[in-house]
Image (spheres, rainbow, N blue to C red):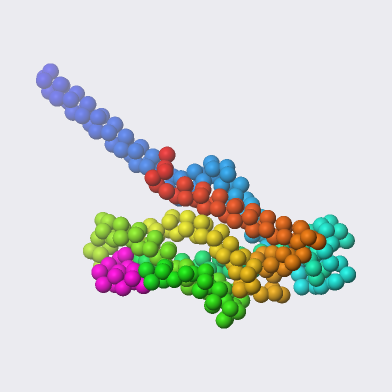
Amino acid sequence: MAQGSEFVTADADALSNESAAARRRVLERTQLRSTPGFYHRAARKFMRNKVSVVGLVLTLIIIVLVLGAGLISKYLIHQNYATTNFAEQYLPPFTQGHILGTDLNGRDELARLLYGGRVSLMVAGVAALATLVVGSIVGSTAGYFGGFIDTVLMRTVDVMLSIPAFSLLILIATLYSPGPVGLGLVIAFLGWPGVSRLIRGEVLGLRSRDFIDAARVVGASNARIIVRHIMPSVIPIIVVWISLAIPGLILTEAALSFLGFGVHIPTPSWGNMLSDAQQSYTQSWWNIFIPGMTIYITVLAINLVGNGLRDALDPRLSE
């Protein structure tokens, strides 16, 4: 009888242990489900980077100002960027209602700065988007299929990279005289090989992963695997590339417009504002300082955001 009681006690203890183990597993699964995801952790890490947050705030302020250029010109400064008044040439800032002064044609500098920023950011945005689309298609196709397709595409990339890009940009802009969108597409035509190589390298490392093999087993097509399974894994690299590429594209547009091969007057851009001001810098130094400092602050702010995103999205730098 005592022996039977011991068996009952042992069974009860075993059941209690199994129940405790089951509760622990449930708690572990609950804790696992409540763990922040990759992008949530990246966002928190980015927000802890105070310098990058300041850069993000500055970037957002600049974007809001240039997008609201029409409203600001109409309701705040009551000036149009194209209105000339030769009686108000070279007015210094905060003179006769001109917050940032006027240029050699008597046009309001603030209105031209806001509209010029819209054009410069448009060129950079179009160039970045077109570069990313072409580079993603070429890079993902070459990395996923490999073999002959990879060889042909990468040799094409090598040929494109051997071309002196800035000289060719000047030649194309001289012959074609593009507008902001056209200039962005021309820049993208010469800029996609770099990002295609970057994406190809990532796809080469992803195509042999287990989840890609599982997608093939269930019958997913190559296009679906690339679009639904591979490209989402490349998104962090794409985000970092865009944030670091846009400042360079802004500087490229400014350089081309300064040399007279980019956006042409009367359409303002930060580059051609500098070009206009160089002939009168002794009379109105602010016409060079203001657009130059605006380019500097914009490029610096976006670079700070890009550095913060790179640190936050790189799993090798995770805490």
Q: Quadrant of the N terminus?
A: top left
Front-most of residues 202 and 33: 202
Instruction: Examine the rendered structure and indicate whether residue 152 appears above or below residue 244.
Output: below
Range drawn in magenta: 142-156
* Residue 287 vertical position relative to residue 170 in the rendered view, above or below: above
Q: Where is residue 140 drawn, in percent x and y?
A: 36, 66
Residue displayed at 72% across by 64% down: 278
Q: Is residue 134 magenta?
A: no
Residue at point 11%, 20% (across, down) = 3
Q: Main secondary structure of the magenta part?
A: helix
- Decide: is 311 above or below 235: above
Q: Quadrant of the C terminus?
A: top left
Residue 164, can we see it?
yes
Residue 73, percent from left and from top? 77, 66
Q: Is residue 303 left or right of residue 15?
A: right
Q: Is residue 122 visible?
A: no
Question: Could you tell me residue 289's position as x and y percent?
Answer: 72, 57
Residue drawn at the location 51% of the way across and 60% of the way down: 245
